[in-house]
């Protein structure tokens, strides 16, 4: 048992010592490894819900600027299904803004499928709302997202029809 524990701790020290320097740094260094946020093309291997997917790299990605209902809330499963139909198993292009990670260490990005901004489409179809994080930089596509949200509201689509979200 002692040999196992010694090996476990030695492995963690070696991993952290040789890890990339992509760590959270507030006032003092922390040993939290974060994903690499790089623009480019990635395959979606799993759709978790209406605003979160898993990339071929194993990293979780949350769509920047939007919030879809959780799976156990009204429209949660519908949002997941629509997102799956849009991007499941497909290669998408990620575009990062100033904020590249959320507080849970997930990547934050705009997701493009050909010329379609998936974040915007989720909002326009009523499967998500515009979501802004306090004390963060203005989103590059904020006006597009807000316009899509207004279209969904006017048409009473999705979350704008449901009163429980």
Image: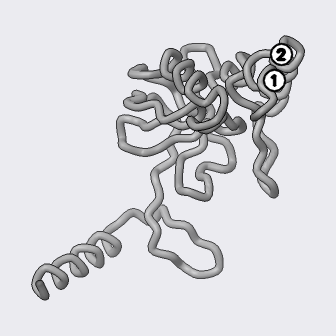
The quarter of the displayed image where residue 52 is located: top right
Residue at the (54%, 26%) spot, across then down: 80
Instruction: Name the residue tied to disc 2.
Output: 156
Q: Is residue 143 above or below residue 137?
A: above
**Which residue is nearer to you in this view: 56 or 46?**
46
Q: Residue at x 62, y 23 (%)?
A: 118
Disc 2, SS: loop
153 vs 22, left or right, is right
- In the rendered image, residue 150, in percent from the top left (x then y), is placed at 87, 21
Q: Is residue 148 visible?
A: no
Please name the residue shown 52% across and 41% down the image.
Answer: 61
Quadrant for residue 109, please give it: top right
Local SS, label 1: helix
Work out which residue is located at the far bottom of the displayed protein and give it: 2
Please indicate, yes or no, whether residue 88 appears anywhere in the rendered image: yes
Q: Residue at x 78, y 44 (%)?
A: 132
The relative height of residue 82 versus residue 67 in the rendered view (above or below) is above
Mark 2, other Cα within 10 Å: few <14 / some 14–19 / many ≥20: some
| Residue 48 horizontal/vertical position (percent) | 48, 35
Pointer 1: what residue? 160
Residue 138: mark in rendering: none
Q: Quadrant of the N terminus?
A: bottom left
Q: Is residue 117 above or below residue 56?
A: above
Contact (Cβ within 8 Å) of mark 1 with mark 2: yes
150 and 145: which is toward the camera: 150
Q: Residues within 10 Å of mark 1 (few under 14, many from 20)?
A: many
Q: CA separation, marks 1 and 2?
A: 5 Å
Picture layout, residue 87 above or below residue 23: above
Residue 147, position in %: x, y?
A: 85, 22
Q: Is residue 38 left or right of residue 69?
A: left
Image quadrant containing the C terminus: top right
């Amino acid at each position: 048992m002692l040999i196992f524990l010694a090996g476990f701790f030695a492995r963690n020290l070696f991993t952290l010592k040789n890890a990339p320097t992509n760590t959270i740094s507030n006032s003092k260094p922390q040993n939290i490894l974060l994903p690499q946020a790089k623009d480019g093309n990635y395959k979606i291997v799993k759709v978790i819900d209406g605003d979160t997917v898993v990339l071929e790299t194993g990293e979780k990605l949350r769509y920047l600027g939007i919030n879809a209902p959780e799976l156990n809330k009204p429209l949660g499963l519908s949002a997941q299904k629509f997102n799956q139909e849009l991007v499941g198993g497909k290669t998408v292009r990620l575009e990062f803004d100033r904020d590249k990670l959320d507080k849970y260490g997930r990547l934050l990005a705009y997701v493009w499928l050909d010329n379609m901004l998936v974040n915007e489409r989720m909002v326009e179809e009523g499967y998500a709302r515009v979501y802004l994080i306090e004390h963060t930089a203005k989103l590059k596509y904020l006006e597009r997202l807000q316009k899509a949200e207004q279209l969904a509201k006017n048409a009473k689509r999705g979350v704008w029809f449901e009163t429980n979200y």
